[in-house]
Image (tube, grey):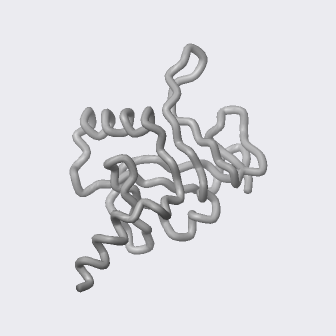
Amino acid sequence: MSEVKDSVSMNDTKMQPITLTDGAIRQLQRIRQDQEIPADHGLRVGVKGGGCSGFSYVLGFDLQKENDDVFQIGGLTVFMEKAHAIYLLGIEIDWVDGLNNRGFSFNNPNAKDTCGCGTSFSA
């Protein structure tokens, strides 16, 4: 019985705390393939102290940890520490590939202030 419950909660996308755009998903899948990331690694989205505005974003492939919530977004398994949800709820992660900027961008409705490079924020 718990097997079904776990499966349902992992695949329930109604409560996704974050959004990954199609461009971000394509780039993350490309990175997974190019760097030969093992299948048991998921995408870790989080925050850490530091950066010019107080917090900086964490985005990378990692193994699941005990305090993680697990989500399925666009075919990717996403790990996020439960405590980070307060900072990341509603964030949209995109891949920008333009003339002046290339990389992941973070549109965070919880950020009170962001730095010029867009990789750190204050809440």
Q: Nearer the viewer, residue 121 or 6?
A: 6
Quadrant containing the N terminus in the rendered view = bottom left
Q: Is residue 82 left or right of residue 11?
A: right
Residue 19 spot, x, y in % from top left:
51, 48
Quadrant containing the C terminus in the rendered view = bottom right
Residue 68 spot, x, y in % from top left:
43, 68
Q: Is residue 112 above or below residue 35?
A: below
Task: Residue 87: name its quadrant.
Answer: bottom right
Task: Report the residue that reaches farthest toward the right.
Answer: 112
Q: Is residue 113 left or right of residue 99?
A: right
Q: Nearer the viewer, residue 116 or 96?
A: 96
Residue pictured at 71% horizontal, 43% vertical: 52
Q: Is residue 3 left or right of residue 113?
A: left
Residue 71 spot, x, y in % from top left:
40, 61
Q: Is residue 39 above or below residue 85?
A: above
Task: Residue 8: name its quadrant.
Answer: bottom left
Residue 65 spot, x, y in % from top left:
37, 68
Q: Nearer the viewer, residue 65 or 22?
A: 22
Numbered circles on residues, count: 0
Task: Report the residue that reaches farthest toward the bottom.
Answer: 1
Residue pictured at 49% horizontal, 59% vertical: 16
Residue pictured at 47% horizontal, 44% vertical: 20
Task: Report the residue that reaches farthest toward the front.
Answer: 14
Q: Is residue 89 above or below residue 57?
A: below
